[in-house]
Every structure is written in structure tokens, then in C-alpha cells.
Image: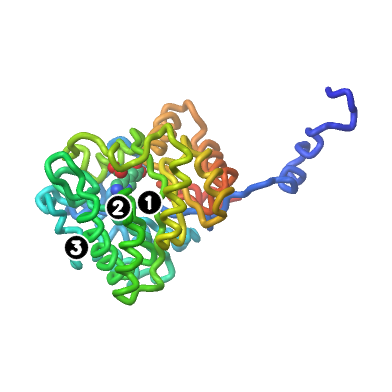
Amino acid sequence: MSSFPDLRLRRTRQAAWSRRLVRESSLSTDDLIWAIFVSDQDKPRDPVAAMPGCDRVNIDELVKDARRAAALGIPAIALFPHIDPASKTADAREALNPNGLIPSAVRAVKAAVPQIGVVVDVALDPYTDHGHDGLMEGDVILNDPTLDMLAQSAVVLAEAGADIVAPSDMMDGRIGAVRTALETAGHQDVMVMSYAAKYASAFYGPYRDAIGTSAALKGDKRTYQMDSANTNEALREVELDLLEGADMVLVKPGMPYLDIIRRIKDEFAVPTFAYQVSGEYAMITAAAQNGWLDEKRVILESLTAFKRAGCDGIITYFAPRAAGWLADG
Ligand code: PBG
């Protein structure tokens, strides 16, 4: 006990009502974006090996999931494609196919569940035969030729009805290229969520299996994704993306990078999101399945931590589960 007997911080912790009263941040279903893998394979649902409880879904199942999301009050879903290896090429041309998997998925969701927000990733890696986010010459990523592809693919996705395009490729100058292309094509109302601080991370492992890029990926992504040791550089990435027209920014992965979220929010005070990535999902789920962690409490605590760090929202594979628990109170 301190020498001043009236300094007792435990007073406000005594009862549920007083803890609620002094709570500094809160998690609500309004904060959640549900990340969903969409597949062009025949199977309606296909489990992802390292992500128990998370399936790749075909478009019919996706529409059901979108209905479920809307019923739970989840504001938006984010779509990530599993593309048949036969459609992958060095020039990633499938990314520009207006009748490709993701444009078709967006149209189907928007027709059936118009009230839900649809976020789409803009990146070439699902479509390249080498698994990188940019076009390549030998071992070198071609930054500027990639921008044109990204811009065109953003327009294809906007045309299909996407509400938010989210460039996740980490090429320099891509937000400006995407914004300009959207304006030129008359899509001034489509929002850009920039993966501004995206780190070269081992936490993406299960995702790359889920969308089928890990088998193809040659080398790693360290020449374009950020070094996990850096934080000042994240602020520069965010500043440039805002100047180029980003409406919101995202930090990825999530939990190992809460310090980056806090710095960005303090510095720029713009809508800031975290992506609780596949490896974070895998860690929590594996421990919970072994009975080593309390699944519900750990998931809600991890999501609340993002809010405390300064996030406005979180892209997460746990969204439907979390929304269900939040509705139960
Ligand atoms: C690729 C992309 C990645 C993720 C989302 N978009 C992985 C990568 O950069 O290889 C990872 C998401 C996750 O791990 O859940 N543009």
C-alpha cells in the first residue's frame, strides 16, 4: 500500500459497473472487418490447413457468409482470392479480368447484400506465377510497370462494385496511381485503404497456403515489404500514402506491431486499421484447441488491444465469432 492511504487504484476496479464506467476503450462489432478467402474451386467450402475454423469458400457460400455478417451487424467483409494455378501468369493478366473470381464475387455480394461494405485487396500476388506482388524481370521487381497493373485492377474492382480498394503490394507510388485511375474512370466515391505499413513477416505463412501462393513464391518479399525492425519508416510510408490520396491506412501484421499503430494514430489522427493476420489466427486457434488458452477471452482481449493502441477497426478472421460473443454481452 502506498504511504498515502487514499491513493487506491483498486477502488474503481471493485465492481463490474465501475470498471465499465472508467473503461478507456471498447470493442464493438462496428470495429470489425471479416477477412474471407474466396476460391474458384468446385468445393463449396474447403478448410485451410493451418487455420482451423476458416474455409476457402465458393461464391455461393460467400453470399451466405455476407448475409451472416450483415445479420451479425459486421459493417464490412474483405475478400482474398484463391486462384487456380492454371490462371497464373508472369504478367498477372487474370488480375484485370472483369469476369474473374473477385469481380464476380463482389457483384454477387452486392446484389444479394447491398448494405454490407466490400473491401478488396489490390495486389498481383494471387495472379503471378512467381507469387510476388509485382511484375518481375529476372529476380528484380519492376516497381513502375506494376503501378499501371494495380491501377487498372483497382478500376476493374471498382467497376464490379467494390466500396474500398486496399492496395497491399507495397510498391512505391501505388496509392497515387490507384487514386488517379479511379478518378479518371469516374469512381471518385470508392475509398482507398492503404496497407501503408506492411512488414515482411513470417506471420503470413498460413495465408499464403490458403490462397495457394506459397508453393509458387520464389525468394521473399523483403525488397518491398518493410523491415520488422523499423518504425520511423512506417510514418514516412503513411505520410506519402495520405499525400497520394489514401482515405485510411492499415498496419499489418497486427499484434506484434501495436507500437506502430499508436505512433501513426498520434502523428496523423486518420482512420487507422490493423490486420490481425493468418499467423495470429493460427497461434491463438492452435493454443485454444489444445486447451492452453481460453479462446473467447483471448480473442476479445486481442481485438480490444487494437482499439487501445488507436485502431478504428480491425480486419480479422475472427469477426463472426467475435460479433457473436459481443452480441451475447
Ligand atoms: C498479399 C497479401 C498478403 C496478406 C494479405 N494480402 C500476404 C503477403 O504479403 O504475402 C496476408 C494476410 C494474412 O496473413 O492473413 N498481397
Disc 1 or 2, which lies upstream in sequence?
1
**Disc 2 secondary structure class:** strand
The residue indicated by pointer 3 is: 96
> In the figure, 20 relative to 104: above or below?
above
Q: Nearer the viewer, mark 3 or mark 2?
A: 3
Residue 207 percent location from the top left of the image: 30, 42
| Residue at 64 percent of width and 48 percent of height | 25
Residue 47 percent location from the top left of the image: 28, 43
Amino acid identity at mark 3: Leu
**Dividing the picture into quarters, in which one does residue 38 lie?**
bottom left
| Residue at 32 percent of width and 56 percent of height | 174
The residue indicated by pointer 1 is: 35
The residue indicated by pointer 2 is: 80
Disc 3 or 2, which lies upstream in sequence?
2
Amino acid identity at mark 2: Phe
Q: Estimate the spatial distance between the alpha carbons at disc 1 and disc 3, rounded to whole Å.
A: 22 Å
**Dividing the picture into quarters, in which one does residue 246 lie?**
bottom left
Q: Estimate the spatial distance between the alpha carbons at disc 1 and disc 2, rounded to whole Å.
A: 7 Å
Q: Nearer the viewer, residue 138 or 189?
A: 138
